[in-house]
Amino acid sequence: MRNLLFKAAFCGEAFHGWQMQANAVTVQGELTNAWERLTGEHPNIIGCSRTDAGVHAREYYFSVKTDATVPVDRFPAALTSAKLPPAIALYECREVPQGFNARFDCEKKEYEYRIAVSDVQSPFDVGRAFWCRRQLDAERMNAAAGTFVGTHDFSAFCAADTDVQSKVRTIYSAEVTRTGPYVCFTVCGDGFLYNMVRIMAGTLLYVSDGKIAVEDVPSIIESKDRTAAGLTMPPDGLYLNRVVMKQSAFTEDEKE
């Protein structure tokens, strides 16, 4: 039996998130259906992240163990041909050690929250960016984003019903940039809580609006109080931008 790691991307507006659900179209569900059609196996597909409904992924990894003999260089095309929806793209496949797990062997994730600032909403941004009519202060937002960096208890930046053992996460970088009509919040960390990036983005929007001061963000983090932070932004503008897997996924020749 081989353990395979796939690199993928998907447009989230077509799905009710990553995780398989009985009565909804999901990324994991569509991959499972295509896999069954191609190989006859019922696979256990393990994703690197549980994205919510409407959230996109520019880079995504999933691992699966299989007895199928399809060569790794042909597997992405073969699986795509097994009626995989066009909103899911498979870029590459490689064999990894038996103990490798796409969820637990993911070291870093980088997310981007994309805001389109314009008087009229572009039809090309519908479902792909949060539309904002008012001007945003990207410099103030960037100053506030920098205070997220470090190891903190992010209880104030996750859904109130989040049930995890620890809400401590490490943020390696966080910044807000402006490119044309888009204001983008990019954040990289070792892991993220449920709705964490969307609440961070909502807090930065409050900073731009003057509802929260830049210097108040560290105290909001320390408060561990969800009600002290900003709103939970819609999923439309959220992208899983980049994923860093443990080097055990690569051969010696491929390691950086």
Image (spheres, rainbow, N blue to C red):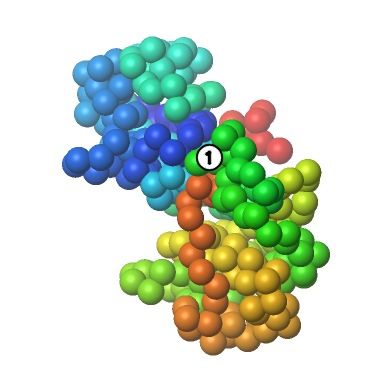
Q: In which quarter of the image is residue 218?
A: bottom right
Whole-percent x and y of residue 118? Answer: 69, 48
Task: Name the secondary structure under disc 1.
Answer: loop
Q: Quadrant of the N terminus?
A: top left
- 112 relative position to 198: left or right: right
Percent across and percent down for residue 7 are 51, 31
Q: Does residue 196 appear in this view?
A: no
Nearer to me, 255 or 26: 26
Q: In the image, 141: left or right of 198?
A: right
* Residue picked out by circle 1: 126
Q: Is residue 137 above or below residue 250?
A: below
The kind of residue on which mark 1 rests is Val
181 or 98, which lies in front?
Answer: 181
Residue in view at x 73 percent, y 59 percent: 135
Nearer to me, 14 or 252: 14
Residue extending furthest toward the front: 119
Q: In terms of depth relative to the viewer, which is nearer, 254 or 144?
A: 144
123 horizontally vs 29: left or right: right
The residue at 46%/69% (across/down) is 158
Quarter of the image containing the C terminus? top right
Residue 75: x %, y % from top left: 43, 17
Find residue 136 and report its horizontal and vertical position in percent.
72, 61
The picture quadrant where one finds residue 140 is bottom right
